């Protein structure tokens, strides 16, 4: 994979570009993609953003999000865009399988493929890119790419808002271990360019419907189990809860972080029965590696302190397997 700054000559003449990200995009996947979208459009390229699935309502303020093609509900439009593409940008994921039903279409593309990502162990089949696991967010890598290409002057308010949104969420509002001076330097620069941060926090965090907050209370009260012997908290959410509280895409975002507020807890796991499959989210504080844990036991991965996985077993069986995995990791968790 050649370094990202080597794409400069490719951008010197108008290109047909597709940007895509992982399924159920979060603020970093969507923010980095839309920032790149605005930037490449400013350079005069024809740009489409394809999301493998729909995305949460709390991202629907992002400049440009109404132009995003949802592959699941607008497949024909996406396939038409995929038929004539010169450059494919893959943002905020490390393996093509994270694009769900879009994956076979991406694999079949013969165009130049570019990766911008910060997850561990990326797939090797990219022509250009940056894979930097020390970057707090993919949005930071997009910012640094624009700077490396000498195009800072194109960072307008739309780009700044998208970059900030991706960064504020992936760093847990600048508190996770992944927060660096690098990312604060980016934010300082964006603020010097006129970025207003408060409306972005409000759009993302103070935008719940009542049911979402009640679901949070219900989950903390009835679904949370603390395993002090493993310094671990598990929340297992049955499908019936998702129905009862009428949850929408994105409504469980952030829930996994709450248990880490308990003294001494090293790992939190959120296990949700999504009907077709059981999705797992892992977070850790300090030295427990949830990327390896997610990879080993639940066909997943991610980052050292934040990862995910999946299971095709029932919720009950997945919980049993999770507890078994805790037993096997007892020494590391103690
Ligand atoms: P979340 O728990 O917020 O869904 O995901 C946490 C981190 O782990 C994210 O960076 C996400 O990209 C990654 N991740 C989540 N689920 C999976 C998965 O099933 N496979 C892989 N490889 N990464 C995942
Ligand atoms: Mn990210």
Image: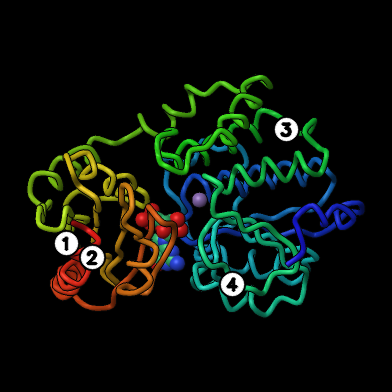
Picture quarter with the N terminus: bottom right
Dot 3: within a 10 Å radius of its alpha carbon, few (fewer than 14), some, or many (20 or more) residues? many
- Which image quadrant shows ligand 1? bottom left
Helix, strand, or loop for circle 4? loop
Q: Position of residue 329 (x, y in %)?
A: 22, 67
Nearer mark to the viewer, of 3 and 2: 3
Crowding around mark 1 (Cα neighbors within 10 Å: few <14, some 14 to 19, many 20+) is some
Q: Which is nearer the N-term, disc 3 or disc 2?
A: 3
Q: Residue at x 72, y 32 (%)?
A: 155
Tell me the element at label 2: strand
Determine which residue is flagged by label 3. Answer: 155
Pointers 3 and 2 in contact (CB under 8 A)? Answer: no
Q: Is residue 238 above or below residue 105?
A: above
**Residue assigned mark 4:** 123
Q: Is residue 145 left or right of residue 75?
A: right
Q: Residue at x 91, y 51 (%)?
A: 12
The numbered mark, 4 or 3, whose residue comes first in the sequence reads: 4
- In the picture of the structure, the residue carrying the numbered disc 2 is 273
Label 2 within 8 A of ligand 1 by Cβ: no
Query: Which one is earlier in the sequence, the residue at label 3 or at label 1?
Result: 3
- For the C terminus, give its image quadrant: bottom left
The nearer-to-camera label among 3 and 1 is: 3
Residue 315 appearing in the image: no
> Could you tell me which residue is drawn at 28 percent across and 44 percent down?
257
Q: Total marks drawn?
A: 4
Q: Earlier in the sequence, mark 1 or mark 4?
A: 4
Place of residue 74 in the rendered image (x, y in percent of width and height, measured from the top left):
56, 63
Q: Which residue is mark 1?
A: 238
Task: Provide residue 125's location: percent of width, then percent of height.
Answer: 67, 74
């Amino acid at each position: 994979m050649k370094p990202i700054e080597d794409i400069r000559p490719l951008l010197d003449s108008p290109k047909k570009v597709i940007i895509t990200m992982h399924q159920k995009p979060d603020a970093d996947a969507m923010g980095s993609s839309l920032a790149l979208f605005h930037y490449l459009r400013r350079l005069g390229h024809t740009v489409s953003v394809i999301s493998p699935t729909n995305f949460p309502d709390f991202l629907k303020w992002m400049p440009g999000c109404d132009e995003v093609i949802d592959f699941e509900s607008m497949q024909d439009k996406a396939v038409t865009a995929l038929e004539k593409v010169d450059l494919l940008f893959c943002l905020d994921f490390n393996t093509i399988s994270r694009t769900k039903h879009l994956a076979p279409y991406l694999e079949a593309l013969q165009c130049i493929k570019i990766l911008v990502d910060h997850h561990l162990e990326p797939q090797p089949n990219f022509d250009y890119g940056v894979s930097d696991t020390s970057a707090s967010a993919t949005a930071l890598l997009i910012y640094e790419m624009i700077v490396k290409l000498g195009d800072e002057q194109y960072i307008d308010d739309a780009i700044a808002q998208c970059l900030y949104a991706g960064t504020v969420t992936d760093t847990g509002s600048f508190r996770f271990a992944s927060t660096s001076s690098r990312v604060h330097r980016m934010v300082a620069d964006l603020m010097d360019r006129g970025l207003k941060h408060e409306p972005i926090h409000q759009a993302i965090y103070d935008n719940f419907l009542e049911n979402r907050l009640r679901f949070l209370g219900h989950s903390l009260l009835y679904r949370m189990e603390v395993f002090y012997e493993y310094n671990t908290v598990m929340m297992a959410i049955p499908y019936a809860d998702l129905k009862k509280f009428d949850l929408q895409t994105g409504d469980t975002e952030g829930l996994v972080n709450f248990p880490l507020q308990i003294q001494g807890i090293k790992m939190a796991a959120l296990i949700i029965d999504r009907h077709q499959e059981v999705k797992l989210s892992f977070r850790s504080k300090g030295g427990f590696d949830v990327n390896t844990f997610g990879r080993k036991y639940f066909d997943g991965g991610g980052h050292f302190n934040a990862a995910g996985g999946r299971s095709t077993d029932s919720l009950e069986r997945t919980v049993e397997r999770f507890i078994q995995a805790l037993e096997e990791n007892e020494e590391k968790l103690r």
